[in-house]
Amino acid sequence: MADAEDRLGSGQACKRCCGFHWRGKATIIIPLATLPLMIYGLMEGQRAWICMFLVANMALFWITEAIPLYLTALFPIVFLPLFGILPSDKVCSFYFSDTVVMFLGGLLIALAIEYSNLHQRIALTTILIVGCSPRRLHFGLVMVTCFISLWISNSAATAMMCPIVKAVLNEMEAQNMFAIYKTQEEEPVEEGDPPHPSTISMAFYFGIAYASSIGGCGTLIGTGTNLTYKGLYDTRFPNSEEKIDFPIFMAYAIPFVVIVLIFLTYLSLQITHMGLFRPKSKIGQEVKKGAEGKDIVKAVIKERKKELGSMSCHEIQVGLLFILMIFLLFTRRPGFFPGWADFLNAKAIGSGPPVFFSVLFLFALPTQYTFFKYCCGKAPFPGQTMDACLSWVYCHKYTPFGLCFLLGGGFALAEGSRVCGMAKMLGESLAFAGNMHHVLVVAMCIFLSLFCTAFASNVAICNILIPIFSEMALAIKVHPITLTFPAALACSLAFHLPVSTPPNAIISGYTGLKTKYMAVAGILPTFWSFFCLLFTGTVWTMV
C-alpha cells in the first residue's frame, strides 16, 4: 500500500492523466462538446446546424492540432456525404480544383528554382548591387527575401536566407565591427545552450522573417493563404464579374507590400534594433563602425557568389520557364485587354494550365546539352542519362502535398456551408454590422484575422473566417471583396510568436531567439499592417 505522502492529489493526478496522449482525449472531448449542435440540427431538421457541427469540430481540431492539420482537412470527404449535404464526387473534386492545381504547380516551380540554386544567385547579386554597409545590407536582405517570397513559399525563402545572414554577421564579428551575440550579463543562457543573438543580429533575422510573410502577400502563388482565398471566393461567387486573377490580385496587393515592407516594417526595425535617429546610442555607434568595414563584407559576398560559378544552363532554363509562367498568368485574362485565353475556342481556361505548361518542360528539358557531342561520336560514352531540370525524386521529397489537402478541405467546407444554408445563417446573424460604418466593419474583420492567425495555421484561419465574412458582406450589402480581401491578407501577417507562421518558427529554431523578443518586435509591424490594410480596404471600397 502506498504511503499517504506518495499519493497524488486529485488535481495533480488529473493533470498527469491528461498529459499522457492528450490528443487522444481531445479527439473524444471535442466532438462530445459540440454534439448539441448535431442534436439540435437533427431535431429541427436543419442541415445548417449539422454542418455547423462539422465546421466547429474542424475549427477546434485545426486550432488545437489534436489531429494533424492535413488529416482534419479530409473530414469533408467523409462527413459532407454522410450528412447528406454534398455528394462524394462533388466533394472530392475540390481537392484537385483549378486553384489547388495552380498551387501545386507554383510549388514545383519554386522547387525547380531551389534545385537549380538560382535563388542563391539572385540573393547574392541583389545584395552586391544594394550595398554592404549594415543599413544597406539590412535593406538588401529584406528586399531580396521579399522578392523571392513573391514566387516561392515563405518558409523556403526564409530558410534560404538564414545561412546568408549568418555568414555575413559572422564576418562582421570577425572584423570586430559589432557583437552578434548578447553577453551572459545581457541575456543569461544555460551551459551548453547557444548564445542569444544581439539586438542588431535580431534586426537581420526579424527582417527576413517579416519580409517573407509580407512578400508572400504580393502574388497568388506567394503563399497558400492567397490561393485559399481565391478558391473560397470563386466557390462562393462563381458568377461574379470581379474575378480574383493573377494581375488583379497583384494590383491590389503589391502597393500594400511595398508600403508596409519598405517604408514601415524596415524603418521600424531600423529604429528599434539598429539605432536609427539615435547616432550616439551604443547600437548606433556599432552600426556606424560596421559601415566603415563594408568593403570586407562585400568581399565575403563576392566570394560566396564566386563559389556558385558562372550561370549554368540549368539556371537559365529554369529562369526562362519561370518568366514564361508569369507571362502566361498575366496575359491569360488580364481584364484591361483581351488575353490569350479569350482568343482560344476552347472551354474556360483557369490558372492551373499555364502554370503546369511550364512545369511539364521542367521534367522534359535536360540540365545541359553536352549529350549532343555523343550523337556522332565514339565510345566511351557516359554511363548515365542526363538529369532533367527538375527531378521527381526531389519533388516527392520536398513537396508539401498535405497543403493541397488543406486547401481542398477548406473549399469543400465552404461549398457545403453554402449549400446547406449555414454560411447564410451566420452572415445574417451578423447583419447588425449594417448599422456600423463600413470602415469599422473592415477594421473588425482585419483585427479578428490578425488575432486568430497569431495562434493557429494561416490557411486554417482563412478557411474558417473568409466564408463568414463573405456572407456578412452580403447581409450588410457591401461588396464581398471589401471585407474578405484585407482579411485574407491579414491571415498571413503574424509577427509575434514562433508558432504563428513558418518564417517565425524557422528563425526561432535557427538562432534560438526567445519568444519575448519576437513578441515585442512584432508590435510595430502588426500596427502598420492593420492600418495599411484598413486604408487599402477603404480605397478599394471607393473604387
Image (cartoon, grey):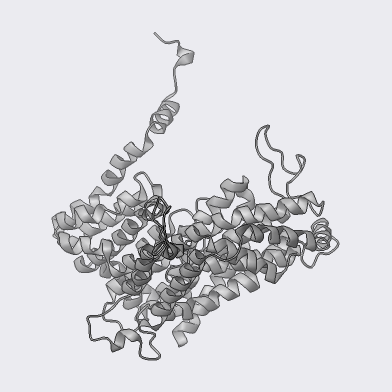
Q: Residue 31 location, x and y as percent?
A: 27, 46
- Quadrant location of the C terminus? bottom left
- Quadrant location of the N terminus? top left
Q: Nearer the viewer, residue 85 or 347?
A: 347
Q: Residue 219 location, x and y as percent?
A: 46, 72
Query: From the viewer's perspective, is 540 left or right of 300?
Result: left
User: Quadrant of the rendered structure where residue 330 is?
Assistant: bottom left
Query: From the viewer's perspective, is 240 left or right of 435?
Result: left
Q: How many marks?
A: 0
Q: Is residue 111 above or below residue 510?
A: below
Q: Nearer the viewer, residue 372 or 431?
A: 372
Question: Taking the image as drawn, is residue 22 in sight?
Answer: yes
User: Quadrant of the rendered structure where residue 324 is?
Assistant: bottom left
Check the image and name the residue furthest to the bottom.
337
Check the image and name the residue furthest to the top.
1
Check the image and name the residue furthest to the right.
280
Q: Residue 199 location, x and y as percent?
A: 72, 53
Query: From the viewer's perspective, is 536 left or right of 31?
Result: right
Question: Taking the image as drawn, is residue 367 in sight?
Answer: no
Q: Is residue 163 above or below residue 216?
A: above
Q: Residue at x 71, y 61 (%)?
A: 272
Q: Residue 540 location, x and y as percent?
A: 46, 83
Q: Is residue 8 above or below residue 354?
A: above
Q: Nearer the viewer, residue 210 or 533?
A: 210
Q: Residue at x 34, y 51 (%)?
A: 70
User: Quadrant of the rendered structure where residue 325 is?
Assistant: bottom left
